[in-house]
Image (cartoon, rainbow, N blue to C red):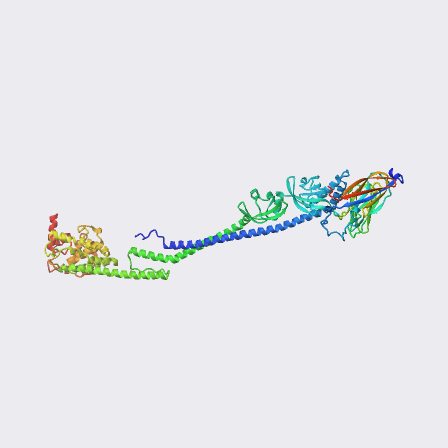
Amino acid sequence: MSVIGAQEGNTGTIDGRVHVVSHPARRLATAGAYPGRTVGIQAEREGSELDNVIVFVDTEMHVDAQPQRVTIRQTNEEFVPHVVAVTMGSTVDFPNDDLIFHNVFSLSRAATFDLGRYPRHASKSRTFTKPGIVKVFCHLHSHMSAIVRVFSHPHFAIPDRDGRFTIPGVPSGRHQVTAWHERAGEVTHSATVEGGGTAELSFSLPLSDPE
Amino acid sequence: MRPPPFPRSPRLVVKVLGFAFTVIACVIMAVFVLFSWHTNARLTKAVADNMEASQLRFAGIEERLRRERTLQAMTLAENPTLKAAVDTYYAERDSGLAIDQLLSTIETELTKLQRMMAVPALSVADVRGVVLASAGPSKYDWPAGARLRLLVEADGAPVETVVARNGRQYLATAAPLVLGRDVIGEFFLASPLDDAYAVALARESRADIAILLDGRVTASSTPAPLRQALDGIALPLSGSVVLGGDEFVVRRLSAVDSASVYALSSVTAAARTATSEAGWVLLLVGAGALLLAGGGSWWLARTVAMPIDQLTSSLARMARARDLTQPLPRGGGSRELDVLADTFDNLRTAVSLAEAESEAAYLGVIGALAAALDARDPYTAGHSQRVADLSVAIGRQMQLPGADIETLRLGALLHDIGKIGVSDAVLRKPGKLTMEEFEQIKLHPTLGARILKPLRFLDAQLPIVELHHERPDGRGYPHGLKGEEIPLFARIVHVADAFDAMTSARAYRSALPVATAVAELWRLIGLDFDPQAVQAMAALPVALAEPATAVALAEPAPTLETVEALGALVPFPTRPAAVVNQSAQLLRRAE
């Protein structure tokens, strides 16, 4: 039980904008060996890379929170959404919307699992109990991947279409706030949160070569 | 035997044979050489074309293989386990947590793939270009942790390239590991460009393979000398080069960066078997043709030259035998030769006729001369003709051949021709001959021989003329020959001469009866007269004409002594008794 979150009214909000500068060098003009192999039309991912960004308070402190139940759908050979952020103990459902079999597995330390293959309209779920990055793949379709980031606290947010985010209920005090993207890496800024106040932060994530 | 006029000239048959054979052989050899050259050129061309076609085909196969390698790399790069492990590894690389399990997942997956692929090296690098794991026999050239980025293309398309790893050259195919739209790593298929690779390629392409890097041979399936010959040579993309004296068909199968793979096929080596086989066949045909040419030449030589040869040898034989009586044999070889033989025969006939005419003329002259000689003395008129007839009769009795009879006749006709050199005074002297006169008489055989000697056609008659006064007991003249030393003809003529002299009248006596003459012959047989000739003479009808009992001479017959003396001393037994006596006296005196 965290000290920070113990006192009501002693919390503030962090909000701001995330800006993703997409690096064209890392975008593929051709998609894999079998571009025509996918079922249906593999639509361009809706939205922008902003959907794949998580802004979070970078702390390992444990804050109890209500477990969530979120869904990552398998649609048109894609995991949608690509990135979800949950608190520990949350459960993720993986319903299959496609006419084909799908599989869900992960090699990540935070959650190593294999839900096996299952057909359309079937769904399997997984409860994540350890914090960390869980990379989820489909064994049948090697181009499919999703990320479940599990936090020990609820102080995280995914920016909206405009890149705006709001993390409410952050205990007052000085915090390290990180914006993370699977390819772009992460950018961390400091923010001082006062009770009832709002700290503004601005992140710029270049999707550059990760060397 | 006379030597041939031109001993060094070859025979016509040899010349014709040699000439015909040389010409035919030259033509055959020329055809042979041209044909074998042409065949060799054609064979070499065919082999080169064949090799070029096969290399072209293999180049196509190699190009397809290259595409397949790329596709293979791309397909293998789609492996979900590899992708998941690489991506997870990448996400957790900086977490400080143990990531060995992820790396061994990758390595296990690579090992499984390598077992299926039998590629020397399979390798995976992450998106930073750090090798995560490798598999295959050559994996030690691709160790984990090594930095390697082959996908420099912005769009991440697969590439094939040559990489140096630990000093070894690798042909590497790289494909991106793609997740969604992102490149999360690189996947490599690599084969070392070594001799084993070249040999494997060579086995598939059925040509020698040379791998050149920047113009230098890094690997080849060829033997060392050829490899050295290849170094530093600018090889054409396709075409032919001469290496170490052999012609090679060359084609560049592929070129990756600075490395080129060439296929080489030795036309010379491939054509050698074919050309040598063809050469043997041609040689056999050529030898057969030469044999035929030899046979043909021989036949030609026989047909053309042999009749001429026969004609020539017939002529030579006739010339040797001085016999122009026989017509030339007709070879039937050709019309020309027959005309030649006819012409020669006509000529020969003409010459024979002319010769015969001139001989006849000579004989006529000589016969006339002899007759004239005989006519100098009325007592000896017709003597030569009678002796001739008698000699012929004796010869016939002795069964001599016809030619000998003729020789005998002429010799006898001319036997006293030498008396032309004896003066009338001596020859017609009715009385006794003095010693000198007799010596003069004795000269006539030698003189006759001298007169006739220039007449070559009377060669056979010369001994008769010269020796018709020799006696078997050696007391004759001019040489005093004995018995068999005296030619038979001379002995016959001697008998005939004596018989005619005895049976002819002389100025100093009448003719002796035949029987007396025959008796005389018998009496002096072996001494003055040849026994054979006497026996033959005695058997003649002329000798038997009068029986011995009828020998009753009106005139006193010569005494035995007289005849004895006559036989002993006088060449002519019919010499007058006075001469005989005189001779006897001379003899006695001499003794």
- Looking at the rendered structure, the number of numbered marks drawn on it comes to 0
* Vertical arrangement, residue B172 with respect to residue B467, above or below: above
The picture places residue B255, in percent across and down from the top left corner, at 62, 47
Quarter holding residue A150: top right
Residue B394 visible at all: no
* Vertical arrangement, residue B409 with respect to residue B168, above or below: below
Q: Which of B348 and B490 is in front in this view?
A: B348
Residue B12 visible at all: yes
* Vertical arrangement, residue B6 with respect to residue A169, above or below: below
The picture places residue B465, in percent across and down from the top left corner, at 20, 55
Quadrant that contains the C terminus of chain A: top right
Q: Nearer the viewer, residue B270 or B546?
A: B270
Q: Which of A64 and B33 is in front in this view?
A: A64
Quarter holding residue B102: top right
The picture places residue B177, in percent across and down from the top left corner, at 72, 46
Q: Which of B227 and B359 is in front in this view?
A: B227
Quadrant that contains the N terminus of chain A: top right
Quarter holding residue B224: top right
The picture places residue B157, in percent across and down from the top left corner, at 69, 48
The residue lying furthest to the right in this view is A8
